[in-house]
């Protein structure tokens, strides 16, 4: 894929990260469904070891952007795109790279918790190993189940019933199980599309704490409609907007505290202050 026009968005400010974590960068992403352009030259660096929040009204292309980052966009037959996605500088769309490799390195958690309901809790955590063809001994699998459930903030609640079905957990627990499942294949980036929208405030809080812990080992990109949540968890933020049928663009991005406290663009100010 080639970028055709100059990037109108300046790179975000430097952000503290660690070298072992992967940065993910979108360059000049333009996306279509059929003839309809839904994103227009969106560029964003999501720094290693940080939480980047994507905010903006419904329909402005946040989920599409997220799905482009791990090549899920191409599952939609009418979908096409231009631009580049780089994971630590490497092209995620390189034709010589296996699709599963991109998906393995860039995990996704969805709005609605979607564990395999009839599978046990531990089978859910291990499900990704089968998909990626990863071999692990029995003791390695047991260790992995424990470490992923610990990281997902669920271990203490389920350690005595790992064989119980995933579908029997509460909504918040199911979402944490999905986080644990996505961690089992050791992604370098975790994409989260409104992961708390279907949850009560207590579960939301637990997931936020889990995210903040996880950000030490995996780069997180979260879509959220909850401004307080964006302020609580993210170091940097990007405001997407699609006005009156035009494709989605990033209006403003940068340090979350600065953007919420002192937005540069009036449209950002209106949005973060709940005026539309
Ligand atoms: P957001 O997540 O910000 O609410 P989306 O990325 O879901 O926005 O959608 C952006 C635009 O793309 C919307 O106009 C939506 O209707 C359209 N869109 C999303 N998915 C599809 C699809 N599978 N087919 C056609 N249009 C789609
Ligand atoms: Mg969405």
Image (tube, grey):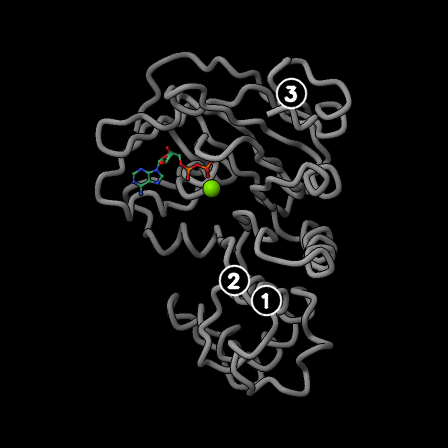
According to the image, label 2 marks what residue? 113
Q: How many marks?
A: 3
Determine the residue positioned at 33% across, 51% down.
99
**Contact check, label 2 and label 1, Cβ < 8 Å:** yes
- Look at the numbered disc 2 and give the secondary structure of its residue: loop
* Label 3, residues with CA under 10 Å away: few <14, some 14-19, many ≥20: few
Where residue 141 appears, as percent x and y from the top left, is 54, 79
According to the image, label 3 marks what residue? 270
- Look at the numbered disc 3 and give the secondary structure of its residue: helix
Quarter of the picture holding the C terminus: top right
Q: Is residue 20 left or right of residue 90?
A: right
Determine the residue positioned at 60% across, 84% down.
162
Q: Nearer the viewer, residue 89 or 121?
A: 121
Vertical side of 107 occupied by 48: above or below: above
Question: In the image, which disc is placed on residue 171?
Answer: 1
Query: Closer to the N terminus: mark 2 or mark 1?
Result: 2
Asked if ligand 1 lies within 8 A of label 3, the reply is: no
Vertical side of 48 occupied by 217: above or below: below
Q: Nearer the viewer, residue 251 or 189?
A: 251
User: Quadrant of the rendered structure where residue 268 is?
Assistant: top right
């Amino acid at each position: 894929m080639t970028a055709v026009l100059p990037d109108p968005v300046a790179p975000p400010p430097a952000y503290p990260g660690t070298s072992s974590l992967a940065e993910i960068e979108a360059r000049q992403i333009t996306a279509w469904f059929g003839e309809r352009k839904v994103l227009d030259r969106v560029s964003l660096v999501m720094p290693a070891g940080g939480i980047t929040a994507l905010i903006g009204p419904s329909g402005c292309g946040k989920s599409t952007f997220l799905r482009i980052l791990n090549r899920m966009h191409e599952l939609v037959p009418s979908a096409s795109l231009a631009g580049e996605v780089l994971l630590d500088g490497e092209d995620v769309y390189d034709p010589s790279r296996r699709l599963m490799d991109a998906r393995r390195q860039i995990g996704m958690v969805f709005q609605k918790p979607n564990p395999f309901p009839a599978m046990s809790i531990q089978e859910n955590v291990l499900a990704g190993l089968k998909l990626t063809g990863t071999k692990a001994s029995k003791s390695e699998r047991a260790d992995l189940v424990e470490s992923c459930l610990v990281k997902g903030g669920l271990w203490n609640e389920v350690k005595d019933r790992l064989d119980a079905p995933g579908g029997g957990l509460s909504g918040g627990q199911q979402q944490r199980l999905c986080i644990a499942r996505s961690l089992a294949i050791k992604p370098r980036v975790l994409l989260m599309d409104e992961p708390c929208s279907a949850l009560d405030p207590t579960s939301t809080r637990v997931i936020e704490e889990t995210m903040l812990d996880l950000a030490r080992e995996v780069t997180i990109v979260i879509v959220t409609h909850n401004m307080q949540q964006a302020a609580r968890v993210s170091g940097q933020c990007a405001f997407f907007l699609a006005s009156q049928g035009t494709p989605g663009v990033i209006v403003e991005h940068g340090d979350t505290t600065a953007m919420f406290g002192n937005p540069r663009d009036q449209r950002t100010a209106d949005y973060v202050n709940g005026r539309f």
